[in-house]
Image (cartoon, grey):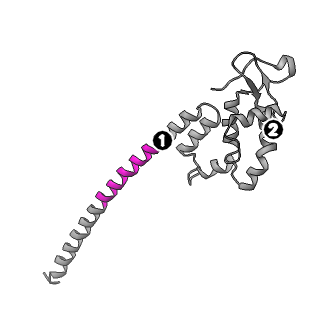
C-alpha cells in the first residue's frame, strides 16, 4: 500500500510518501485518534481553503498529499486536542507491551499497520484472527486448569488417607 509516486526531488527537493485523500483520512485517524476527521470531504475542504497543501494530479488520482504536509497539518489542527485528551499513539503502544517489556502480538500487528504494510481492512481482520486464537488458547488453558485442580484434589485426598492410616498405627510395631 505504500506509495512513492514520481520522484519530485529534481523539481522541488522533496521525496516523501504520497497519500490520496482517503489514505490521508486513515493516516490522520491513526496518528490523531478520536480527534481526526472521519470524512474525506473534511480533507478536501482543508485543501480548498489552503490549510493543507496538496498536488492535483491529472486523471482519476485526484489530490496527492505529501506526508510532511499531512503531518504538519495534523500537528497544527489536531495536535493540541490530542495532547489534551492524552491519546498519543506512543502511549497506546507502551500500554500493549507485556510486563517483561517484550512486544505482544497486538503491538506487532499495530506496528505493521503504522508502517502501512496493512490497510485498515486487513488490520482489522488480523486483530480479529489473533483475538480468536487467544480466546481459544484461554479456553484450552481453563480446561487444563480444571483438570489440574481435579488432580490436585485427588492427591490431597490420597495424602489424607495415608496420613489417617499412618496415624492409626501403633508406635512400637
Q: Percent from the top left, x then y, of residue 20?
A: 70, 27
Q: Which residue is mark 1?
A: 128
Question: Closer to the camera, 127 or 59?
Answer: 59
Q: Residue at x 43, y 44 (%)?
A: 132
State whether residue 165 is above or below residue 103.
Answer: below
Q: Which residue is mark 2?
A: 72
Total number of numbered labels?
Answer: 2
CA distance for labels 1 and 2: 33 Å
Q: Is residue 129 left or right of residue 164?
A: right
Q: Secondary structure at mark 2?
A: helix
Where does the magenta region start and end?
Answer: 130-148
- Residue 138 among those drawn in magenta: yes
State whether residue 118 is above or below residue 158.
Answer: above
Quadrant into which the C terminus falls: bottom left
The circle on residue 79 is none
Q: Secondary structure at mark 1?
A: helix
Q: Is residue 159 left or right of residue 94?
A: left
Of all residues, the one furthest to the left in this rendering is 173
State whether residue 137 is above or below residue 61.
Answer: below
Q: Percent from the top left, x then y, of residue 127?
A: 51, 41
State whether residue 53 is above or below residue 91.
Answer: above
Amino acid at each position: 500500500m505504500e506509495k512513492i509516486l514520481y520522484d519530485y526531488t529534481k523539481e522541488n527537493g522533496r521525496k516523501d510518501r504520497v497519500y490520496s485523500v482517503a489514505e490521508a483520512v486513515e493516516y490522520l485517524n491513526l496518528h490523531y485518534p478520536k480527534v481526526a476527521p472521519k470524512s474525506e470531504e473534511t480533507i478536501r475542504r482543508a485543501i480548498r481553503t489552503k490549510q493543507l497543501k496538496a498536488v492535483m494530479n491529472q486523471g482519476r488520482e485526484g489530490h496527492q498529499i505529501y506526508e510532511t504536509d499531512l503531518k504538519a497539518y495534523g500537528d497544527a489542527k489536531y495536535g493540541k486536542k490530542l495532547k489534551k485528551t492524552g491519546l498519543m499513539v506512543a502511549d497506546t503502544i507502551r500500554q500493549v507491551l507485556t510486563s517483561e517489556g517484550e512486544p505482544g502480538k497486538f503491538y506487532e500487528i499495530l506496528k505493521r499497520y503504522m508502517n502501512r504494510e496493512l490497510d485498515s481492512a486487513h488490520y482489522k481482520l488480523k486483530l480479529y484472527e489473533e483475538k480468536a486464537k487467544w480466546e481459544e488458547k484461554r479456553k484450552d488453558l481453563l480446561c487444563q486448569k480444571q483438570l489440574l485442580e481435579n488432580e490436585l484434589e485427588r492427591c490431597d485426598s490420597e495424602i489424607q488417607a495415608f496420613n489417617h492410616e499412618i496415624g492409626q498405627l501403633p508406635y512400637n510395631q
